Amino acid sequence: MNYSTPSLAPLLFCLVATLFTFFVPPVKAQGSADLAPSELMLSTDLNAPGSRGAGAENSFATIHQSGNLLDAHIAQTGAELEAVILQTGYLNSALIDQDGFGHEAAILQSGSNNEALIKQQGAFNNALIEQTGSDKSASIAQSGQLVNILVRQYR
């Protein structure tokens, strides 16, 4: 018999999202944000002046950074979107750009000089990038619907 291995991406995303629910306060928002690199332990109103407000109804975005010279941005347009970025270390950068409905994304990075990008269009796509170490780069571009992608890089 030939058995296929189930995808771990949805399970891993649920685990990460659950951990963030307990340790990082969520941001309920209608709008989007382009956040400065110096914002640590961020909890912000995405409807505030200066946010790019194209509309992200019933969406959630969290950025939690600890370290030096870190850069993180989240942009959301659509509804029911979830995005999480957590970075520690030095000179890491991350971007999540979501357009559509029902997307889930998470970027976790530690180390130095790492780059991660998740771009989602369509509906119900899940993406997770997890990187530890130095000088790593990962990019996920999803379009369509019900696409699950997991990228892990260590050392």
Image (tube, helix red, strand yellow):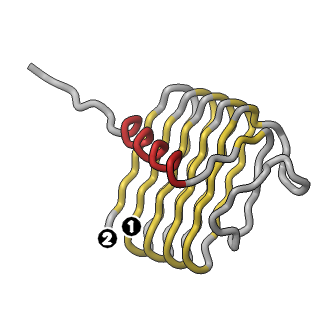
Mark 1 = which residue?
132
Determine the secondary structure under disc 2.
loop
At 84% from the left edge and 53% from the top edge, which residue is drawn?
Answer: 51
Mark 2 = which residue?
155
- Whether 92 is drawn above or below 100: the answer is below
Residue 15 locus on image (x, y percent): 40, 43
| Disc marking residue 25 | none
* Callout 2 amino acid: Arg
Residue 116 locus on image (x, y percent): 53, 59
In the displayed structure image, the side of residue 127 where residue 133 appears, left or right: left
- Whether 125 is drawn above or below 128: the answer is above
Q: CA distance from mark 1 to mark 2?
A: 6 Å
Q: Are marks 1 and 2 in contact (CB under 8 Å)?
A: yes
- Quarter of the picture containing the N terminus is top left
* Callout 1 amino acid: Thr
View extreme (left): residue: 1
At 52% from the left edge and 78% from the top edge, which residue is drawn?
Answer: 90
- Quarter of the picture containing the C terminus is bottom left
Which of the two labelled residues, at mark 1 and mark 2, occupies the earlier sequence position? 1
- Asked where in the image residue 43 lies, by quadrant, the reply is bottom right
Residue 132 locus on image (x, y percent): 38, 67
Determine the secondary structure under disc 1.
strand
Viewer-side residue, 18 vs 139: 18
At 73% from the left edge and 61% from the top edge, which residue is drawn?
Answer: 35
In the displayed structure image, the side of residue 30 where residue 73 appears, left or right: left
